[in-house]
Image (cartoon, rainbow, N blue to C red):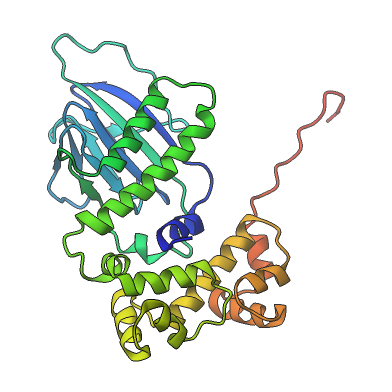
């Protein structure tokens, strides 16, 4: 897998959800901070994003997209002066029912909103380096793949068809990847530094693909430099400058992140997890894991496991 896909896969928990809704002015919602990430797409009308901490409001026009990758609390309204009420959504992301028509002459706004459940225990720097909110304005002819994903998602939510329960989560995952790709590769103000520079640099990107493609391999800096087409010293300098860690330090970090995901999501035997993350023995893996996480792999797996659901009494049960 490539680094962007891998980073999201390592952090994803649960199913994403979304909703398509119409609002009639005046309207305003206050979204509380969350552990996940969220987005808003303005399909029709006008709206204002109200960032926290007194930052200036951001006007949104039709086609504009806002990604809040850190789950930052914020407001969304038809006008900055409109009073806000707490946004209350069902567990599936749906909004409370609203009238088919607003007051006579009221401005109509069509929104597409969604949320992702993400674990931040081992957040990848691709997300941690993002600003509090990412605003991608609509421009004619810009980002056609992102626009296509938005159109498909909006259509599925507006008119569900057989298979929509599977299609919508897949489209939400696709949309998140397109949002991140669009920001890092085209919209970020300074694309020559940090992870934007790493993804856009052919040499460093090649080394990252090698690491993510085979994290169990006993990579050396020289071998990764060969993948990048650079000398050992030149590669190490460039990789460290853009990624923020030396090559082998990033390899170790990614191995442990991968191990944590495997332990958190399934019952893969420890010896198999060790082999997949480049350790010759379960003992060596457990030692490295405890050094990184502060606990043994088995303890981590037990703590990360969802709580067991209590069985309901049967019809014949007595109290």
How far across and down, in percent of the image, does residue 308 sit? 70, 47
How far across and down, in percent of the image, does residue 64 sit? 21, 38
Foreground residue, 81 or 120? 120
Quadrant of the image occupied by residue 201: bottom left
Left or right: residue 283 versus residue 51 is right
> What's the residue at 16%, 50% (across, down)?
54
Foreground residue, 155 or 270? 155
Residue 137 versus residue 186 in the image, above or below: above
> What's the residue at 31%, 54% (across, down)?
181
Q: Quadrant of the C terminus?
A: top right
Foreground residue, 246 or 22? 246
Quadrant of the image occupied by residue 60: top left
How far across and down, in percent of the image, does residue 74 sit? 27, 44
Quadrant of the image occupied by residue 109: top left
Give the number of marks: 0
Q: In the current view of this chain or complex, which residue is farthest to the top?
A: 104
> What's the residue at 16%, 30% (across, down)?
46
How far across and down, in percent of the image, does residue 264 sit? 61, 59
Residue 270 versus residue 112 in the image, above or below: below
Is residue 213 among the parts visible in the rendering? Answer: yes
Is residue 88 among the parts visible in the rendering? Answer: no
> What's the residue at 34%, 54% (across, down)?
70
Left or right: residue 259 versus residue 159 is right
Residue 238 versus residue 262 in the image, above or below: below
């Amino acid at each position: 897998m490539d680094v962007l896909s891998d980073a999201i896969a390592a952090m994803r928990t649960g199913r994403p959800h979304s909703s398509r809704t119409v609002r009639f002015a005046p309207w305003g919602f206050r979204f509380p901070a969350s552990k996940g990430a969220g987005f808003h797409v303005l399909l029709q009308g006008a709206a204002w994003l109200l960032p926290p901490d007194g930052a200036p409001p951001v006007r949104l026009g039709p086609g504009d997209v806002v990604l809040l990758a850190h789950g930052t609390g914020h407001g969304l309204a038809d006008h900055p002066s409109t009073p806000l009420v707490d946004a209350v959504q069902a567990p599936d992301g749906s909004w409370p029912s609203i009238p088919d028509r607003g007051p006579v002459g009221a401005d109509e706004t069509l929104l597409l909103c969604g949320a992702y459940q993400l674990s931040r225990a081992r957040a990848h720097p691709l997300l941690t380096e993002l600003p509090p909110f990412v605003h991608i304005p609509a421009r004619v002819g810009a980002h056609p793949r992102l626009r296509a994903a938005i159109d498909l998602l909006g259509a599925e939510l507006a008119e569900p068809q057989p298979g929509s329960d599977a299609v919508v989560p897949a489209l939400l995952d696709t949309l998140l990847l397109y949002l991140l790709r669009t920001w890092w590769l085209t919209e970020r103000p300074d694309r020559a530094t940090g992870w934007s520079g790493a993804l856009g640099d052919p040499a460093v990107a090649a080394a990252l693909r090698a690491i993510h493609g085979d994290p169990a391999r006993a990579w050396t800096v020289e071998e990764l430099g060969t993948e990048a087409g650079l000398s050992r010293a030149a590669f190490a300098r460039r990789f460290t400058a853009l990624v923020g860690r030396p090559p082998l330090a990033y390899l170790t970090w990614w191995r442990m992140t991968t191990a944590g995901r495997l332990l958190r999501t399934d019952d893969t035997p420890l010896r198999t997890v060790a082999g997949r993350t480049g350790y010759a023995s379960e003992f060596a893996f457990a030692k490295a894991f405890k050094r990184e996480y502060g606990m043994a792999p088995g303890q981590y797996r037990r703590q990360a496991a969802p709580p067991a659901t209590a069985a309901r009494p049967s019809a014949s049960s007595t109290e």
